[in-house]
Image: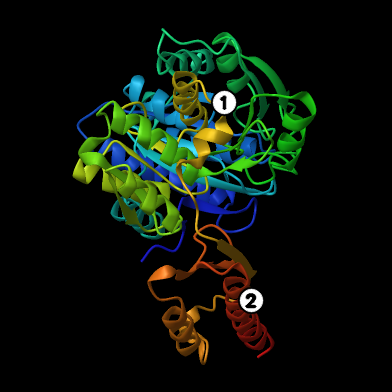
Amino acid sequence: MRTLFGTDGIRGEANIHPMTTEIAMQVGRAIAFLVKNSKHGHRIVIGKDTRLSGYMIENALAAGICSMGVDILLVGPLPTPGIAFITSSMRADAGVVISASHNPFQDNGIKIFSRHGFKLPDEQEAKIEDLIFSQKMEALRPVAEEIGRATRIDDARGRYIVFLKNTFPRRYTLEDLHIVLDCAHGATYGVAPWVFRELGAKVTTIGVNPDGMNINHECGALHPQRMQALVRETGADLGIALDGDGDRLIMADEKGDLVDGDRIMAICAADMLQRRKLAKKTLVATVMSNMGLEVAMRRMGGRMVRTKVGDRYVVEEMRTNGYTLGGEQSGHLIFLKHNSTGDGILAALQLLVSLIKKQKPLSELATIMEPFPQVLKNVRTATKITPAQIPGFAKKLAKFEQKLGEQGRILVRPSGTEPVIRVMVEGEDTKQINAMADELCDLISRADNGLAES
């Protein structure tokens, strides 16, 4: 059982357990301990987003790693996929990202990449937890010249920009496009504008002035309204909203209407199918992706397989079975031939290739998929209640599922990153699925309140 790690690393409010300097130092020691037991070199990359607490966590991690005799490479603010890329390209033994992704600034998190740039599997995270809570590391305390060193990599941002531009075919240009770009005051602020401008686009930017506390605040992939409005006001061709650590995106077409991860996957899958680049004609998505995406894939002559929520589970499925494209409705898209994790900038570039080749506006490309009506509601909980503990919940759920039949589905799951239970209902009747979601959410809220008061 893992008690520190959730769906995407360790996450929580900074300076409150588990996101304390004490835990961060022990995580650093544990990662270094595992590296020291490998036959490879002893270097670990550390990067972060723009949160105020990033300095605190960075220093604690660095201290823990160096105390075990392992060197660190500090890259500063850089998108999560950029840190995965740097880890692999510099042949380091691991990469650590300090970020809480789309969460508000007071939260922070720790994600860990292997030497090949892939997120650690559950078993490795469990091993790190075991090292933290046991005494297995106490025997190893290097001294004198055996203590690790820290080196700052000043050109990491430039290396990543060059990598991203190289994923965009040289025969194409963005010269005729006007893009509204929202960097969420996060880790992409020093990367994304340069990538799109150097490829020729006219770029109108927002969310590029981080102050340590404004990351994701009323901007970015979770709050794209300002980006949408600016697309309409300026007459731009499209909008791109990234999240705080740059591993996901949401887009807007030339009308300012949202284009989510499912539609982006459908557009890119169609292009890859046409070029015979979609391995086994298969797209990998999660249980959260709309049924309309499955229908679109079948119509195009492909198929879709689902995993549990979390981009690392998508990647695991892709690696296990040799697939090349996968992602989540939320905007994590993985092009495994290019990078080892979700990359918002890279995904935008791949979609733009399709846009240029087709010579059609994004609104027209997005019609490739017709989504089923879907409602997603979040119930914030004060306790660690699960749906299985709620009297009558299973019976009510079964009743609703029977009503929907094959023309809909219901998914109820605790979030892996927040104290929230997510209720998703999909079906043909918008009024019906909203009523079902509300009823299920009400059951959860009442049970949680009752448990909190007892």
Secondary element at image label 1 = strand
Residue found 65% across the figure and 52% down from its top: 15
Residue 302 in the image: state x and y as whole percent: 27, 44
Secondary element at image label 2 = helix
- Left or right: where 393 falls relative to 271: right
- Left or right: where 403 falls relative to 436: left
Residue found 67% across the figure and 83% down from its top: 449
Circle number at residue 76: 1
First along the sequence among labels 2 and 1: 1
Label count reads: 2
Mark 2 is on which residue type? Asp
Query: As rendered, which of 112 and 189 lies closer to the eye?
Result: 189
Pointer 2 residue: 438
Mark 1 is on which residue type? Gly
Quarter that holds the C terminus: bottom right
Q: Residues within 10 Å of mark 1 (few under 14, many from 20)?
A: many
Looking at the image, can residue 142 be seen?
Answer: no
Q: CA distance from mark 2 to mark 1?
A: 43 Å
Residue 397 in the image: state x and y as whole percent: 47, 82
Residue 211 in the image: state x and y as whole percent: 76, 32
